[in-house]
């Protein structure tokens, strides 16, 4: 299955996020502060609690611990293997790679996929800047050409086919709000975006070690973005947030259904009453998602799925809790 098509629907939905960005972003900030901040108190500086570089206390070795952090003096004194815990760096630099290609301008659940992308960006941004850390972003939309843009203080940069926009990493809540307004106000352009080129913007020029978050539906061929993602993982902790709509996983039994490819504009009519067609669609969708998951796992990225028909904030809370629990048990993924 190359790409899932958008399902035409007469169901009314809210105004675009860009038209109500201030109110929505303020509400997102309040939700994130209430539900996510409490999970990240202590030695954690972001959604992916990293090992850091500052020495901390020692504890007994557990299977899965990095042997390079063995505390040999304590091990010799106690005759029990110990590792030296480290405290995460307080000055963290986080970069967002936000895919706003045409396939994201679709949704049959409570949200459009692009709204979930903006919501995820808001959550990560607020969690990053709350400790005085720096946040930057690259945004991709449309076809394959690259056109860098400058300036992002409150006014979205000019958009066009194939625009790749870089927003420099800065600290402070006012700067974070400007970044989010730019993201929310980005106009989605027709045509297929180049997710690999978007991720590559985080590799060039090389940056200090930090956290890189890629938010996309990952519907581009895996061979296009898997190698840049593996390269990104060499220097950074990588979180991949995959945005899914339920209609991309299975078709409803509603008879003849008009569907349109949001990237090419092609319109087709599908007879969804055919159970064999629905089963083939579901099988192809499952195979596609398995390929995406395998590519992300092969790149060493943490993988979070957000759906348009679920509570995205609850899913993020569960993910953060699972990451923290895994870290305390001596595993990283």
Image: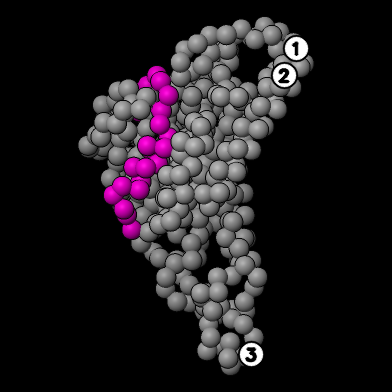
Left or right: where 112 falls relative to 91: right
Q: Where is residue 217 in the image (x, y as percent from the top left)?
A: 52, 33
**Is tag 3's residue or tag 1's residue first in the polypeptide sequence?**
3
Residue ranking furthest to the left = 150
Q: Name the residue under label 1.
A: 274
**Is tag 2's residue or tag 3's residue first in the polypeptide sequence?**
3
Q: Mark 3 points at which residue?
A: 79
Colour setting: one colour
Q: Position of residue 295 (x, y in %)?
A: 55, 43
Please give the range of residues in magenta.
186-208
* Separation of residues labelled 1 and 2 (CA atoms): 7 Å
* Separation of residues labelled 3 and 1 (CA atoms): 68 Å
Disc on res. 85: none
Q: Position of residue 324 (x, y in %)?
A: 58, 59
What secondary structure prevails in the magenta region?
Answer: loop
Left or right: where 254 falls relative to 43: right
Q: Please report contact status of discs 1 and 2: CB closer than 8 Å, yes or no.
A: yes
The residue lying toward the viewer, choosing from 190 and 23, is: 190
* Separation of residues labelled 2 and 3 (CA atoms): 61 Å
Dot 1 crowding, Cα within 10 Å, few <14, some 14–19, many 20+: few
Q: Mark 2 points at which residue?
A: 278
Assign the N terminus to one quadrant of the image.
top right
Query: Is 321 drawn above or below residue 316 in the view shown?
Result: below
- Which structural element holds mark 1? loop
Assign the C terminus to one quadrant of the image.
bottom right
Q: Where is residue 131 in the image (x, y as percent from the top left)?
A: 39, 58
- Which structural element holds mark 2? helix
Whether 205 is among the magenta residues is: yes
């Amino acid at each position: 299955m190359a790409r899932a098509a958008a399902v035409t629907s007469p169901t009314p939905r809210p105004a675009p996020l860009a038209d109500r960005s201030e109110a929505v972003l303020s509400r997102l900030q309040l939700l994130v502060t209430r539900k996510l901040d409490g999970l990240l108190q202590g030695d954690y500086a972001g959604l992916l609690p990293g090992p850091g570089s500052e020495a901390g206390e020692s504890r007994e070795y557990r299977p899965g611990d990095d042997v390079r952090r063995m505390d040999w003096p304590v091990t010799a004194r106690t005759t029990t293997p110990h590792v030296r815990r480290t405290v995460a760096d307080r000055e963290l630099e986080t970069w967002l790679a936000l895919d706003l290609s045409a396939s994201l301008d679709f949704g049959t659940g409570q949200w459009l996929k692009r709204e979930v992308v903006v919501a995820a960006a808001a959550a990560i941004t607020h969690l990053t800047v709350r400790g005085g850390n720096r946040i930057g972003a690259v945004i991709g939309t449309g076809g394959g050409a690259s056109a860098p843009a400058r300036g992002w203080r409150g006014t979205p940069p000019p958009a066009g086919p194939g625009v790749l926009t870089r927003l420099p990493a800065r600290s402070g809540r006012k700067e974070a709000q400007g970044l989010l307004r730019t993201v929310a106000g980005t106009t989605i352009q027709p045509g297929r975006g180049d997710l690999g080129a978007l991720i590559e913007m985080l590799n060039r020029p090389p940056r200090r070690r930090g956290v890189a978050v890629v938010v996309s539906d990952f519907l581009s061929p895996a061979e296009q973005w898997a190698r840049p993602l593996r390269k990104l993982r060499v220097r950074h902790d990588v979180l991949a947030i995959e945005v899914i709509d339920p209609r991309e996983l299975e078709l409803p039994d509603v008879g003849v259904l008009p569907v349109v490819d949001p990237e090419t504009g092609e319109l087709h009519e599908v007879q969804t009453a055919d159970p064999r067609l629905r089963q083939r669609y579901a099988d192809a969708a499952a195979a596609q998602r398995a390929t995406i998951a395998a590519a992300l796992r092969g790149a060493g990225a943490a993988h979070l799925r957000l759906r348009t028909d679920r509570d995205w904030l609850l899913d993020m809370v569960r993910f953060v809790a699972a990451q923290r629990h895994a870290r305390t048990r001596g595993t990283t993924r």
